[in-house]
Amino acid sequence: MRTVSNTIGAGGAMPPATVKVWDPFVRIFHWSLVACFVIAYATGDEIERVHIAAGYAIGGLLAARIVWGFVGPRHARFSNFVRPPREVLAYLRDVALRRAPRYIGHNPAGGVMIIALLAALAGTCATGYMMITDAYWGSKLIEHVHEFLANLTIGLVVAHVLGVLIASFEHRENLVASMVSGRKRAAD
């Protein structure tokens, strides 16, 4: 009797080996943050109660992710992906020359983007909270800073998505799918 292996793909090709990279917390945080930011941005001045609730949810998510950046598993830790500026610039040069190395976790540019997004979102949350306090109620300056940071976040999100698409194309892997499944192709 012949045994058929479940690891053989269509046409007899072996599927690439994968490794677990993104833990459930990171994946749930990522997609929850996307949803909450879309809700907050879309409701803006129109549905204030929903906007404020989404802002508080974002603040809670950010606080949890910052803690996870110090105590979480390897690829979630800031120490794993925050790199010095010279290394980031060298990586960006290599991307432009289409010779950037592949990273199992975040690449140096991705690390900078994570910090930039966390900072912009934290600033947006802080100014949003300030706007509902007695001290800053009606402050046009705080309102303008809040709107600027929210719009800056949109720009960062666009840059983030473009970076993900470029890295996915360059390394021939679907990085969006890996943020859903938590798995990436094993090291080359």
Image: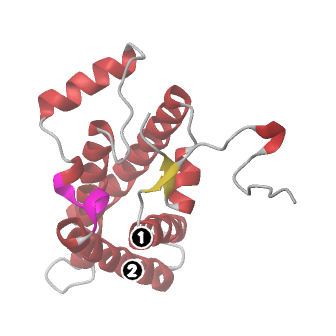
**Camera sees residue 144:** no
Question: Which residue is most to the right?
Answer: 1
Question: Which residue is most to the front?
Answer: 1
Looking at the image, residue 106 sits to the left or right of residue 174; the answer is left
Looking at the image, residue 173 sits to the left or right of residue 10; the answer is left
Marks 2 and 1 close (CB-CB < 8 Å): no
Along the line of sight, the residue nearer the viewer: 26 or 64: 26
User: Which residue is drawn at the image coordinates 41% and 43% (left, top)?
Assistant: 155
Q: Does the magenta segment cover residue 154?
A: no
User: Which residue is drawn at the image coordinates 49% and 63% (left, top)?
Assistant: 34
Query: Badge 1: few (under 14), some or many (20 or more) residues near its Cα, within 10 Å?
Result: some
Q: Give amino acid for label 2.
A: Ala
Main secondary-structure element of the magenta-colored stretch: helix
User: Which callout, 2 or 1, points to the residue nearer the camera?
Assistant: 1
Q: Quadrant of residue 70?
A: bottom left
Q: Which mark is residue 29?
A: 1
Residue interval drawn in magenta = 73-79
The number of numbered badges drawn on the structure is 2
Along the line of sight, the residue nearer the viewer: 76 or 131: 76
Can you give x and y, in whole percent of width and height, for residue 146 in the image?
Answer: 29, 62
Task: Work out how far the residue at label 2 is from the one at label 1, CA to CA, in angstroms.
Answer: 11 Å
Q: Quadrant of residue 103?
A: top left
Q: Does the magenta segment cover residue 77?
A: yes
Q: Secondary structure at mark 2?
A: helix
User: Which residue is drawn at the image coordinates 52% and 64% (left, top)?
Assistant: 38
User: Which residue is drawn at the image coordinates 51% and 56% (left, top)?
Assistant: 183
Residue at label 2?
57
Note whether 13 is above or below 90 in the view shown.
below
User: Which numbered disc, 2 or 1, marks the residue that appears first in the sequence?
Assistant: 1
Q: Secondary structure at mark 1?
A: helix
